[in-house]
Amino acid sequence: MFAVTAAVFELRDVPPAFPPDLRDAPASAFDALAGSAGGAEVPDIPEPQAVRANGQGGGTFQNIAIYGDNTITDYYKVDRSLRQLADSTVALVKKDSLIFDRNSGRYKPLKVSTIGEGRGHSSGTDFHDQRVLSFCSGALVSGDLVLTAGHCVSSEAGASDRFDNIYAVFGWKAGGEGEVAESFAPEDVYTVARIYVRELKNLADASFRNLDSYYDGYKDYALLFLDRPAQGREPLAVDRSGLLTAEGAKVFTIGYPMGMSVKITGPDDASIFRVGRSILATDIDAFGGNSGGAVFDSATRRITGILVTADIRQEELVLNRGLDVPYVVSEELGGSIRGRSERNEAGEVSRRLEIGREAFDYLSRLPATSGLFRTAESRLVIPSGGARIFLNDIKARLVFAAGGGDYSIKPARFERLEGLGGATGAQRLLHLEQLIPLTAAERALCGEIRRRMRPDGGMTVDPTFMMLYREAKCDRSMAI
């Protein structure tokens, strides 16, 4: 008598070269985030996305891409100038995650979860005790206008991310150690009234055949109108000249990674490495949930882009003991890999893999440097201490299907950006700056330029002032 259990992992063809977007899209903001140790569901986001799997064998993991030191910092730990910028950013929150409490007159989360509880992180990992609320990020760029990523919002009827199912929430921040906002005043919570403009290209589209086509052609942005002007919030200035998006320029982002309270990356930590016609390649540290967050030029503190994609190798599996398991090839399974446990009458358990023909053919094409070996006895061997294994790697799927074993999962860290395919992508503003009204500070600057151009009531044609006038887009008549 044998008891048989099976776990099936689907093989996608070659692991995609394009980075995934950075949205966490749980059914409810306080449910386990996509990719938590509670499940193995792939998040409902545009292709491609990193493979998610359970933290079996005592392993834990985080959805994170960090280059060098982790500079992702809480609100209360940064200087006042950065806090002022963060005060004008929004957390995009599903409406079913907040409820209005008539007794207190404030909005409160329906239930509270932490990163450790929701994603299965063990104690001591980064941000283990931090609470989760939002699924995307945004920035206030006019009195009632929010800039975000196109994949964060839709107009599709019945969609959980439909614009009228979303709150834009200000003040989701930590005011001190353990002092995280637990409720929100009505003046900090806004409904998204309508989508002003939105564009989203599917990364799985055949037109994106290489990185050049991605950097030059991918578009992922949205401007959202709130139901009323934001109270007590200063709109953030955008780069209207296009001169700040140069290779080597320092950049940083402010957003709500993994749904946590607002986080700020180090202004001196990241740079632009490539300037495409549509996308900027950077090494900004980013998590799922950072999508839609403003990317700032570090020198001027103006918004130069929208954070939209990141390194697909966000989580790494470490084998503490090598894998050595028998396998058979199945013509019926196609691209799937299935692990079977069989228990005999003596209670002894054996494990074998059933590998679909499509999956097996893909494995056969992997080079020796992949760290995966097949023996003459039809066994698959992955030694410990070999090539790095990322969760979007077919080798990780083999480990999970084989029943776990002795391994752990950790954030993938890189000393530096390793090729443009792994860069954190920022959507350039393109024509969006034309749709965003001048801020009060910009209008004051334009007024001063005009005054100096007409010192005696006449017109002085000064090339310097004319250049400033053009770069500041002072001919714009729109006002907040």
Image (spheres, rainbow, N blue to C red):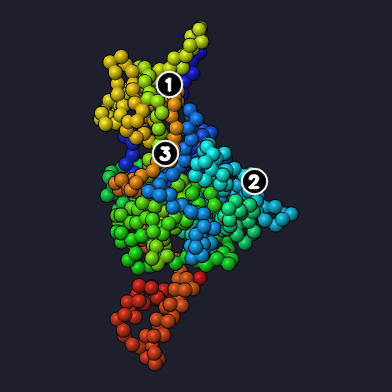
Q: Is residue 299 left or right of residue 162?
A: left
Task: Identify the residue under disc 2.
Answer: 110
Quick one: label 3 or label 2, which is nearer the N terminus?
2
Does dot 1 land on a helix, a strand or a loop? strand
Instruction: Decide: is 322 above or below 180.
Output: above
Instruction: Decide: is 201 above or below 458.
Output: above
Q: Which amino acid does label 3 sit on?
A: Glu
Q: Where is residue 104 in the image (x, y as percent from the top left)?
A: 72, 55
Q: Where is residue 187 in the image (x, y as percent from the top left)?
A: 62, 62
Determine whether label 3 and label 2 are within 8 Å by CB: no
| Circle 1 Cα neighbour tier, 10 Å, few/some/many (<14 / 14–19 / ≥20) | many
* Residue visible at 40% across and 29% down in the picture: 319
Q: Which amino acid does label 1 sit on?
A: Gly
The picture quadrant where one finds residue 397 is: top left
Q: Where is residue 419 in the image (x, y as percent from the top left)?
A: 29, 46
Does dot 2 land on a helix, a strand or a loop? loop
